[in-house]
Image (cartoon, rainbow, N blue to C red):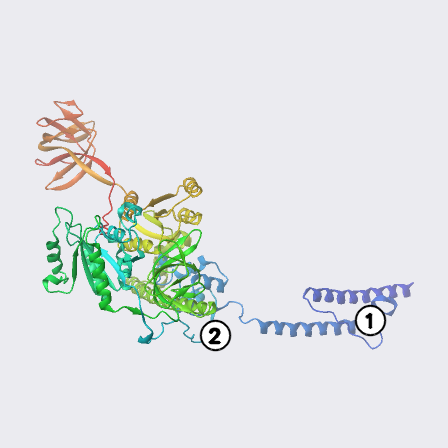
């Protein structure tokens, strides 16, 4: 029996050793290691586990220890391999130059709020910091250290200098291959002086009737065929003050300028500006004095007024041809056309009609069916379908060409205006057109121009950031000087109190837009119209009254995306010569978004000013109702209190107890408020008229003096108007 107990005890000891081995195996499997059994000299582990009678104590213990040693060695080796793969130790942040707030938060494994809280200990103004704001390297290091971490500088990748792949103009052509081309004539002048009517008479079409308000809103380019066979390309530019950039663009591609001046109005503001544009472009002038059929017309006065602006007509010894015309009745129009042809012959206008195309974009717009369209003047080469063009940061493979009447044409030679279809995106008016060999080459040019623009923008952004940082650093140093005498604990307490309101506010709350802000979405029919509106908005200088924020601008009709933007920014949509379909209007009404559509530029600006006025807080205006003088003072006992009373006489208007009063002494207002009592012959009254005496009390602690003035007034809220003057 004792032998049986001894055998069972020995088996239990062996079983305990086997269990310890199995626990070691299970823990190793959890760590992902592979199990490799160690063979013993007599029996493998598998046979030991399967056959209890073969469980010698010394062999089992040796096997377990051998297996444990093997697993421990394997674990150490794999741990070393894993550590080699991890570049950063725990609590170490890899930093680099020009990191944004968001990038630093991601590198640290923290949220953006953590970075904002750390920035409270710097000289940075948190109101100007956004998630995409670039941080200075010193501030990045300080934030990492304040967070209890270490920083490690990332290795800088040396960026190879990119090769310039831009497209350029061809060298000047051989004079022997040049051929005559039509002159490009720009018609300039003040608004409503008859420029469009003149062109209407020249090409026998009704252009004016199509213009909104009778005012040209964008450049029109077309060819006029003369009876003698010559062709003249005319550019009709807007005369309104808002379209100065369009007029300048017209003169940059022209050969000569016809300056239209109304005989009864004389020289006006845009007349002077047009003369300056012609001088800057270095092109000759022809003076067309219009509306000479009117009784009040005075052509001689116009010529004399122009002398003050260095425009000297031939009869005064100058070189400027002057023609008296009536565009409405068609008088002397052929004389003006002959003068234009004669000047073109003197200039000997020729161009190279072979090789790669060069030109200039006059106008750009978006068509719902055709996509981006541009009106261009071809200056060199012959444009045909299939040509690959580059303009600005976009390119086109020409699909169709149209003349000024919308008729498809196969080719456009130098001096010809043409509408081009096939652009990937809308280029800007005034961009230079260059033809390239292939679509791949066009993409290279666009990529290079985009890269150059990004580099310039980055350079400007860095300059602005450095200037801001310098400004904030000076402010920070001034604040530090004020608390320099305090201990570090006291300084920390002062800093906490000063920035507590920022510490507990979210970044979105810190950058929340001011209520007194008008957010705009601007849409126009053509690029030039949008440009003109933006130029007007650039002159806005009343930010202290109401901030103006242009959220988005572009070409084309109002879309659902515009509604979404307006809803997000609580903005207003202004459209110029564009449409909004019924679906868009219903969506805007549902979301409470204002859509303001106009076809005349000055009406759009007037509506914009009205919208600005509605955002201004009402002004409180005081209207005087009556005036009285204090002739005597005395006091009345009411209960235990003595109330000062003034004996007054009304000398202007009346005193109404319901209104507000103020007490004036030595021209200074020393009290404002409501009356406590108003009596006439010891009786309470509501109104005291001119010439009547009364007794009144204002405040129990206010003493009167003989000679004080009592003013009765009424406060009214009046809607303020913006002081912004757009200049027309």
Is 398 positioned to the left or the right of 204 in the image? Answer: right
Q: Which residue is labeled 1 in the image?
A: 57
Q: Nearer the viewer, residue 190 or 221?
A: 221
Q: Is residue 704 shown to the viewer in this render? A: no
Q: Nearer the viewer, residue 387 or 133?
A: 387
Q: Nearer the viewer, residue 148 or 108?
A: 108
Q: CA distance from mark 2 to mark 1?
A: 59 Å
Q: Residue furthest bottom?
A: 41
Tag 1 secondary structure: helix
Q: Residues within 10 Å of mark 2 (few under 14, many from 20)?
A: few
Name the quadrant containing residue 162.
bottom left
**Rendered location of residue 727, percent (x, y):** 22, 52
**Rendered location of residue 412, percent (x, y):** 37, 63
Q: Residue furthest right?
A: 1
Going from the N terminus, do you reach mark 2 or mark 1 first? 1
**Rendered location of residue 699, percent (x, y):** 19, 34
């Amino acid at each position: 029996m004792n032998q049986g107990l001894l055998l069972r005890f020995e088996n239990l000891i062996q079983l305990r050793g086997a269990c310890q081995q199995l626990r070691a195996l299970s823990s190793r499997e959890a760590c992902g290691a592979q199990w490799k059994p160690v063979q013993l000299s007599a029996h493998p582990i598998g046979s030991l586990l399967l056959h209890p009678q073969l469980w010698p104590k010394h062999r089992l213990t040796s096997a377990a220890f051998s297996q444990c040693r093997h697993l421990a060695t394997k674990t150490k080796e794999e741990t070393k391999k894993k550590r080699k793969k991890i570049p950063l130790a725990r609590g170490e942040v890899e930093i680099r130059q020009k990191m944004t707030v968001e990038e630093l938060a991601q590198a640290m494994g923290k949220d953006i709020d953590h970075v904002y809280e750390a920035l409270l200990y710097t000289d940075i103004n948190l109101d100007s910091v956004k998630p995409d704001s670039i941080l200075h390297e010193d501030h990045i290091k300080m934030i990492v250290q304040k967070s209890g971490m270490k920083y490690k500088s990332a290795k800088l990748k040396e960026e190879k200098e990119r090769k310039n792949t831009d497209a350029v103009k061809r060298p000047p052509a051989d004079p022997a291959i040049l051929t005559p081309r039509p002159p490009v004539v720009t018609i300039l002048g003040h608004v409503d002086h008859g420029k469009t009517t003149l062109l209407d008479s020249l090409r026998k079409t009704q252009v004016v009737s199509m213009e909104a308000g009778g005012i040209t809103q964008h450049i029109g380019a077309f060819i006029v065929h003369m009876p003698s066979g010559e062709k003249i390309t005319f550019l009709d530019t807007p005369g309104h003050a808002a379209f100065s950039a369009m007029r300048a663009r017209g003169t940059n591609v022209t050969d000569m300028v016809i300056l239209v001046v109304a005989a009864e109005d004389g020289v006006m503001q845009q007349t002077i500006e047009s003369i300056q544009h012609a001088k800057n472009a270095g092109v000759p002038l022809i003076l067309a004095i219009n509306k000479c059929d009117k009784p009040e017309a005075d052509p001689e006065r116009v010529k004399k007024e122009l002398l003050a602006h260095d425009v000297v007509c031939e009869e005064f010894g100058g070189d400027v041809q002057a023609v008296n015309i009536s565009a409405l009745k068609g008088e002397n129009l052929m004389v003006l056309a002959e003068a234009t042809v004669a000047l073109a012959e003197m200039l000997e206008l020729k161009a190279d009609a072979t090789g790669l195309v060069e030109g200039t974009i006059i106008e750009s717009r978006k068509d719902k069916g055709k996509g981006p369209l541009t009106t261009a003047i071809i200056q060199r080469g012959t444009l045909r379908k299939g040509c690959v063009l580059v303009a600005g940061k976009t390119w086109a493979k020409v699909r169709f060409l149209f003349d000024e009447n919308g008729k498809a044409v196969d080719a456009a030679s130098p001096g010809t205006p043409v509408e081009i279809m096939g652009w990937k995106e809308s280029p800007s008016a005034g961009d230079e057109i260059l033809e390239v060999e292939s679509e791949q080459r066009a993409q290279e040019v666009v990529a290079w121009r985009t890269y150059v623009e990004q580099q310039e923008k980055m350079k400007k952004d860095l300059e602005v950031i450095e200037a801001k940082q310098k400004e904030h650093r000076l402010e920070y140093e001034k604040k530090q000087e004020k608390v320099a005498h305090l201990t570090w604990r006291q300084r920390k307490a002062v800093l906490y109190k000063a920035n507590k309101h920022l510490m507990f506010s979210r970044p979105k709350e810190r950058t929340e837009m001011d209520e007194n802000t008008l957010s705009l979405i601007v849409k126009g029919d053509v690029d030039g119209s949008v440009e003109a509106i933006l130029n007007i908005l650039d002159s806005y200088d009343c930010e202290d009254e109401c901030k103006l924020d242009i959220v988005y601008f572009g070409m084309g009709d109002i879309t659902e995306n515009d509604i979404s933007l307006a809803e997000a920014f609580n903005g207003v949509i202004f459209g110029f010569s564009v449409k909004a379909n019924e679906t868009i209007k219903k969506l805007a009404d549902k979301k409470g978004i204002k859509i303001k559509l106009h076809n005349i530029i000055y009406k759009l600006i007037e509506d914009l000013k009205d919208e600005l006025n509605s955002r201004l807080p009402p002004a409180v205006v005081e209207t005087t109702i009556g005036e009285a003088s204090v002739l005597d003072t005395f006091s009345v006992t009411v209960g235990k209190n003595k109330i000062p009373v003034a004996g007054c006489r009304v000398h202007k208007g009346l005193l109404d107890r319901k209104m507000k009063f103020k007490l004036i002494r030595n021209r200074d207002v020393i009290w404002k408020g409501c009356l406590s009592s108003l009596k006439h012959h010891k009786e309470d009254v509501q109104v005291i008229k001119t010439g009547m005496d009364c007794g009144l009390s204002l405040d129990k602690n206010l003493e009167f003096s003989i000679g004080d003035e009592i003013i009765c007034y009424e406060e009214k809220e009046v809607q303020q108007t913006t002081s912004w003057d757009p200049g027309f």
